[in-house]
Image: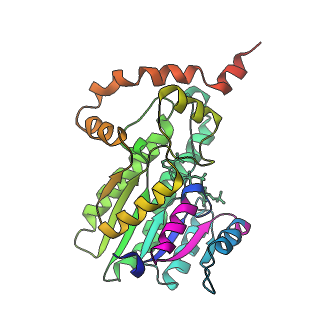
Amino acid sequence: MRAKDARVLLTGATGGIGKAAARALRAAGARVMLSARSPEALVDQANALRSGGDIPTWAAADLCNPQQVQQLAAEAASWRCNVVVHAAGVPAFGPLAGETPEHIASVVQANLVAPMLLTRALLPHLQRLPAAQVIYVGSVLGALALPGFSVYSATKFGLRGFAEGLRRELAHTGVLVQYLGPRSTRTAFNNADVEAYNRATGTAMDDVDIVGAALVRLLEEEQAERFLGFPERLGVRLNGIAPAAMDGSFRRHGKSLADLPSLQERTEP
Ligand SMILES: NC(=O)c1ccc[n+]([C@@H]2O[C@H](COP(=O)([O-])OP(=O)(O)OC[C@H]3O[C@@H](n4cnc5c(N)ncnc54)[C@H](OP(=O)(O)O)[C@@H]3O)[C@@H](O)[C@H]2O)c1
């Protein structure tokens, strides 16, 4: 749909990509309801987006709390949202051996279960509309997994599978389901370890405004999915055809994991 017809519930609105998405959506004429956990950050974000007398509405919710997910869905439905952009997410990077069971479960909950539950809670409202869109902010790593990102990639591959299945399930309705796959992007999401890994492997990092602009294009052009960056798009294609044949391309990434600054600190005498 055209951005000026969109009333967007945006999760992760206080994050690096969320802020850029909110700016780009508003600049294109969309109305936006901002959501994240921190009310203080949401007030700041709403004020930063003020334009004349127009200030976006916001609703705080912890998406890992099922009651708060229901409450957010009810608020968004009464606000008459017709687009949901799921941009909330948490990182996970490093060798699997360094992950705790609790952290793995919390990453799966935030990146995969939470967007499923929010979508489920909003579907009755969205299906009553003549046209609605649900956009998941996934990742290139949801189609091409790299050493050090096994847990994170599992959540984003899962999200992509969920989006694909739901898109086909809802094909006879007015609800379009879409997936946006940014590549590495400069936000607080990526710690010093990820930045060192990206430098060592020659992985480019995008500015957040590239992702904001791509989100608006995806909304308006109504494609099923879009991945950002080259050679990432080519990598996604090839990996989709013959993943095992790609294994040898990531030896440098595997070696870079062993050289991470935090691992070096842990092993220093
Ligand atoms: N940065 C990258 O390199 C990159 C690349 C590809 C894809 N992505 C994806 O893009 C999305 C946004 O990433 P980002 O870089 O903008 O991250 P970010 O700056 O860390 O922002 C994360 C956002 O998610 C919210 N959030 C986290 N846990 C939440 C929870 N339990 N309930 C509600 N909100 C929660 C945070 O707000 P509060 O903490 O206040 O709740 C914040 O608004 C994520 O899904 C990420 O996987 C990022």
As for residue 133 lying within the magenta part, the answer is no
Residue at the spot 35% in from the left edge and 63% down from the top edge: 218
Task: Give whichever of 17, 116 is nearer the camera.
Answer: 17
* Residue 19 visible (yes or no): yes
Q: Quadrant of the N terminus?
A: bottom left
Query: How many marks overall?
Result: 0
Coloration of the structure image:
rainbow
State the image coordinates of residue 156 (x, y, percent, origin top left): 43, 47
In this view, which residue lies farthest toward the right? 269
Q: Is residue 93 above or below residue 7?
A: above
State the image coordinates of residue 75 (x, y, percent, origin top left): 56, 80
State the image coordinates of residue 95 (x, y, percent, origin top left): 55, 27
Which span of residues is magenta-colored? 18-40
State the image coordinates of residue 38 (x, y, percent, origin top left): 70, 64
Task: Give whichever of 60, 254 is nearer the camera.
Answer: 254
Based on the displayed image, in which of its 4 quarters is residue 23 positioned? bottom right
Residue at the spot 56% in from the left edge and 40% down from the top edge: 92
* Residue 12 visible (yes or no): no
Q: Is residue 49 above or below residue 206?
A: below
Viewed as shown, does residue 94 lie left or right of 168? right
Task: Give whichever of 29, 254 is nearer the camera.
Answer: 29
Residue at the spot 66% in from the left edge and 25% down from the top edge: 261
Residue at the spot 52% in from the left edge and 50% down from the top edge: 207
Viewed as shown, does residue 181 lie left or right of 244? right
Q: Is residue 128 above or below residue 151?
A: below
Q: Quadrant of the C terminus?
A: top right
Q: Is residue 20 above or below residue 227?
A: below
Q: Quadrant of ligand 1?
A: bottom right
